[in-house]
Amino acid sequence: MLNPVLTQQSALPNWLRLSWLCISPLGFAFAGRIAWEKTVWTIKRGPQMVGFSLVHIHPTFFIFGVLGASLLMVWIIPAAIYLVAGRSRISKTDVLMLICAGLVATAMIIPDHFFAAK
């Protein structure tokens, strides 16, 4: 008997799913840290240079985090194309992957001063 997880239909090709799996951990961690600085720290401490302390304390994490978050934002384009083209085979996992990549893009795109007191 076949495992239903292994035989699950997907609109995304395996190479796109695998690339998401490889770049998402760093992208999520970096976007989470940046979102934290843009929201909580900006509300509590006022306007600041988001990412400044991160790049000076953990420069390697900053470089690979920016790379991971940027690749996730670019990943959305082919994923959306494949999901539209294969809309009859879209799985919940595909939608979850796209939503998570969209949250990373949102965290990176929101202006640094958006949550600052006016």
Image (cartoon, rainbow, N blue to C red):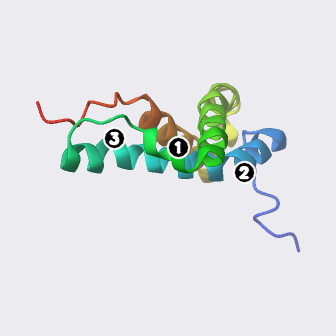
- The alpha-carbon separation of the residues under discs 3 and 2 comes to 26 Å
| Residue 88 image offset from top left, x and y in percent | 66, 37
User: Dividing the picture into quarters, in which one does residue 5 lie?
Assistant: bottom right
Residue 56's label in the rendered image is 1
Relative to 42, say whether 70 is above or below.
Answer: above
User: Dividing the picture into quarters, in which one does residue 62 lie?
Assistant: top right
Q: Secondary structure at mark 1?
A: helix
Which residue is denoted by mark 3 in the rendering?
A: 38
**Total number of numbered labels?**
3
Q: Is residue 20 left or right of residue 39?
A: right
Labels 1 and 2: the sequence-earlier one:
2
Q: Which amino acid type is shown beneath numbered disc 2? A: Leu
Q: Is residue 107 left or right of residue 99?
A: left
Q: Nearer the viewer, residue 74 or 70?
A: 70
Q: Secondary structure at mark 2?
A: helix
Q: Nearer the viewer, residue 75 or 94?
A: 75
Q: Residue at x 53, y 41 (%)?
A: 55
The residue mark sitting in front, 3 or 2, is 3
